[in-house]
Amino acid sequence: MSDRKLPERAEAIRLAVFDVDGVLTDGRLILDDRGVQTKAFHVRDGLGLKALMQHDIEVAVITARQSSVVEHRMTELGIRHLRQGVGDKRQALLDLLAELAVSAEQTSFMGDDLIDWPAMRLCGLSAAPADAVAWIRHRADIVTRAGGGLGAVREFCELLLAERGALLSWQERFQ
């Protein structure tokens, strides 16, 4: 863990990485009678992710599951760094950091469960939704008020923008 204060660490973020199930979604896996999977994403989270990219924060998604629904949503949002079917999120993050020439200290990771912790621990800033498992909530630097898939990602995005002094100007663009 860095000795720098939370606002300084948030301001330094150049890469924001997110898990999917339980972070970008509420964690439920919805299957129809044919076994086809559906996920629900909150539109507010999507706007927050786009805002990060507009303010020079690269966005990436690392998830253990493989889903065409996730691929479709990330493409729709313009997120170029999607890693699916990942068993070792820490190693996937290390590979991504090398590819993008970004340090772990300049990276945040938002996760909700034990499988996310090795990657979260590596980063300069870790975040968890309000409904993450207790073990993760107690270790994350930031715990949002909103739950996964219910605006937690947007809340975290706005925190990052606020620490850059960009939140108000971004919001005012919509007036």
Image (cartoon, rainbow, N blue to C red):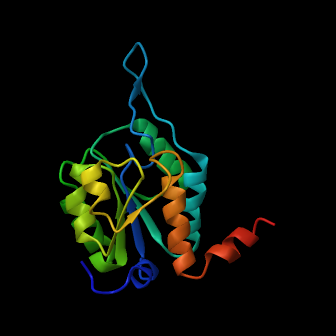
Farthest residue in the right direction?
175
Residue 160, x across and y down, in percent: 50, 72
Corner quadrant of residue 98: bottom left
Corner quadrant of residue 64: top left
Closest to the observer, 38 or 158: 158
Residue found at x 32% / y 39%: 66
Relative vertical location of residue 10 with respect to residue 139 in this rendering, above or below: below
Corner quadrant of residue 27: top left
Relative vertical location of residue 163 with respect to residue 87 in this rendering, above or below: below
Residue found at x 49% / y 56%: 145
In the rendered image, which quarter contains the N terminus?
A: bottom left
Q: Is residue 52 visible?
A: no
- On the rendered structure, is 120 left or right of 154? left
Residue 149, x across and y down, in percent: 48, 45
Residue found at x 18% / y 61%: 91
Residue found at x 69% / y 77%: 169
- On the rendered structure, is 112 left or right of 68? left
In the rendered image, which quarter contains the C terminus?
A: bottom right
Residue 44, x across and y down, in percent: 60, 52
Q: Is residue 155 visible?
A: yes
Numbered circles on residues, count? 0
Residue 73, x across and y down, in percent: 50, 45
